[in-house]
Image (tube, rainbow, N blue to C red):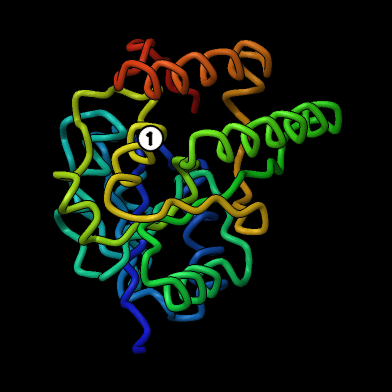
């Protein structure tokens, strides 16, 4: 079986502080295995576009309708790969990440979507411990409902996204990851692996507090599962 082509998409809103380091890790650790790397500049007012455009390996497109899911939809429309992989602009891709995508999709033709957890490079040791407990809880939830993704760490077949009708652009922020997982589950296996992890910033935890943030994510996870819509519409950007 031939290796699938993989498009990497990175939504970015006012990410001048992080996008350069994100792209440096991506280019170094993917070793040319992405068919394309796309940054979706989502109505940024800072230097995100110019910084991302300075990397010749990167295609930068603009989506002027602010909103993470709208940026995802634009990335989906623009991408050419068989599989679309997604990370956030404040992530630092580890070595071997793209190889796990290739391996998992090659060995399981029924796999529709692959995801895994975050680990945080800028939070306290205590918060890392609390988050490890949270991660174990999410694994239990995954085993119960049968689907789970992390929004800044997943890969999905383009044909599955086509069957889903793309992303739900009515969602502003919270609940979008569970919405993707739930809808993708109708058209293929959604697999969550602990060893498919992504390094990222814990800036939301640091600004909102880990308990408040965890509670908000949990409520929206339940709401998406039970009512097929998120419970929280308002959110705040932390840059």
Pinpoint residue 124: horizontal percent, then vertical percent.
81, 30
Q: Secondary structure at mark 1?
A: loop
Q: Which residue is mark 1?
A: 14
- Residue at x 16%, y 58% (from the top left corner): 78
The residue nearer to you, when weighing 205 against 47, is 205
The residue nearer to you, when weighing 133 against 13, is 133
The residue nearer to you, when weighing 84 against 237, is 84
Q: Is residue 168 above or below residue 7?
A: above
Q: Using residue 99 as the reference point, say whether residue 162 is left or right of it.
A: left
Place residue 193 in its image quadrant.
bottom right
Q: Residue furthest bottom?
A: 1
- Residue at x 35%, y 36% (from the top left corner): 13
Pinpoint residue 77: horizontal percent, then vertical percent.
14, 54
- Residue at x 85%, y 33% (from the top left corner): 125
- Residue at x 29%, y 45% (from the top left corner): 186
Place residue 207 in its image quadrant.
top right
The residue nearer to you, when weighing 176 against 40, is 176
Pinpoint residue 88: horizontal percent, then vertical percent.
45, 45
Q: Using residue 172 as the reference point, say whether residue 148 is left or right of it.
A: right
Pinpoint residue 223: horizontal percent, then vertical percent.
40, 16
Q: Using residue 25 as the reference point, say whether residue 170 is left or right of it.
A: left
* Badge 1: residue crowd in 10 Å (few <14, some 14–19, many ≥20): many
């Amino acid at each position: 079986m031939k290796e699938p082509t993989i498009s990497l998409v990175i939504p970015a809103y006012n990410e001048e502080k992080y996008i350069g380091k994100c792209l440096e890790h991506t280019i170094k650790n993917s070793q040319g295995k992405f068919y394309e790397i796309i940054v979706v500049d989502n109505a940024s007012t800072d230097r995100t576009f110019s910084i991302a455009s300075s990397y010749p390996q990167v295609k930068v497109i603009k989506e002027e309708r602010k909103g993470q899911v709208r940026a995802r939809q634009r990335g989906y429309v623009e991408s050419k790969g068989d599989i679309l992989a997604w990370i956030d602009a404040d992530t630092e891709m580890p070595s071997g990440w793209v190889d796990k995508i290739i391996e998992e999709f090659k060995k399981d033709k029924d796999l529709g979507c692959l995801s895994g957890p975050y680990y945080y490079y800028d939070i306290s040791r205590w918060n890392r411990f609390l988050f490890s407990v949270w991660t174990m809880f999410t694994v239990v939830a995954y085993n119960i409902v049968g689907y789970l993704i992390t929004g800044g760490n997943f890969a999905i077949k383009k044909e599955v996204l086509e069957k889903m009708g793309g992303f739900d652009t009515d969602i502003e922020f919270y609940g979008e990851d569970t919405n993707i997982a739930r809808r993708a589950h109708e058209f293929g296996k959604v697999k969550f692996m602990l060893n498919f992890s992504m390094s990222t910033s814990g800036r939301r935890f640091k600004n909102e507090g880990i308990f408040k943030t965890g509670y908000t994510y949990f409520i929206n996870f339940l709401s998406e599962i039970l009512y097929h819509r998120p419970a929280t519409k308002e959110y705040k950007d932390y840059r």
